[in-house]
Image (spheres, rainbow, N blue to C red):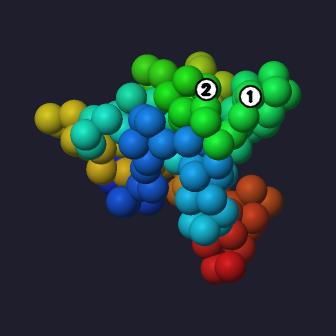
């Protein structure tokens, strides 16, 4: 039986509006204990911002996190999957695009979740070292 993305994804992904400052986005990430947030404009996906983006695209370029918006440093037009796509399709997209996470959209383009490399590893091989790490992260 083919598993679907909605069966392994994390629902209700953490998002911030596109004009949120990097400092505020960093606080959101800290408080949620996550390394990325989805960037939205009135609920529509506009990008994805990782903790690495903040460091490499902003701090390393001497940009002030208190007045730099997430939209100015996030990855725009992120690769996405649909909630009913096969898990294997998500794995293939991650492999081809060298990604660690994919936003999940409904058929009408509504943002409904995020699926991570860890989510997919747990699905494919529950005994793998990566799945053990992913499971431990969920418990903490």
Q: Write the residue at 39% across / 29% down.
A: 46
Of circles 1 and 2, the one toward us is: 1
Q: Position of residue 112 (x, y in %)?
A: 30, 50
Whether residue 98 can be seen here: yes
Helix, strand or loop status at disc 1 = loop
Is 112 in front, or is 83? 112
Q: Write the residue at 66% across / 25% down.
A: 98
Q: Position of residue 118 (x, y in %)?
A: 63, 53
In the image, farthest residue toward the left: 108
Total numbered badges shown on the rendered structure: 2
Task: State how far apart marks 1 and 2 are (Cα).
Answer: 10 Å
Image quadrant for the C terminus? bottom right
User: Considering only vertical position in the picture, is 19 above or below 32?
Assistant: above
Q: Name the quadrant containing residue 55.
A: top right
Is 104 in front, or is 26? 26
Q: Write the residue at 81% across / 22% down.
A: 61
Tag 2 residue: 73
In the image, farthest residue toward the bottom: 139
With 43 as the anchor, is 130 left or right in this view? Answer: right
Q: Position of residue 45 (x, y in %)?
A: 35, 34
With 46 as the anchor, is 42 left or right in this view? Answer: left
Whether residue 103 can be seen here: no
Marked residue nearer the N-terminal end (1 or 2): 1
Cβ atoms under marks 1 and 2 closer than 8 Å: yes
Tag 1 residue: 63
User: Considering only vertical position in the picture, is 1 above or below 32?
Assistant: above
With 50 as the anchor, is 86 left or right in this view? Answer: left
Q: Position of residue 40 (x, y in %)?
A: 36, 38
Q: Name the quadrant containing residue 30.
A: bottom right
Is 133 in front, or is 72? 72
Q: Write the residue at 44% across / 36% down.
A: 19
User: Considering only vertical position in the picture, is 87 above or below 99?
Assistant: below
């Amino acid at each position: 039986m083919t598993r679907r993305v909605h069966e392994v994804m994390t629902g209700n992904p953490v998002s911030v509006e596109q004009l949120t400052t990097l400092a505020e986005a960093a606080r959101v990430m800290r408080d949620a204990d996550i390394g990325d947030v989805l960037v939205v404009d009135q609920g529509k996906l506009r990008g994805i911002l990782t903790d690495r983006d903040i460091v490499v695209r902003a701090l390393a370029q001497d940009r002030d996190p208190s007045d730099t918006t997430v939209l100015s440093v996030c990855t725009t037009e992120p690769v996405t999957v649909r909630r009913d796509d096969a898990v294997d399709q998500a794995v293939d997209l991650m492999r081809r695009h060298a990604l660690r996470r994919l936003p999940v959209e409904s058929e009408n383009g509504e943002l409904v979740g995020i699926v991570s490399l860890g989510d997919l590893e747990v699905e494919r091989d529950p005994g793998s070292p990566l799945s053990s790490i992913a499971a431990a992260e969920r418990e903490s």
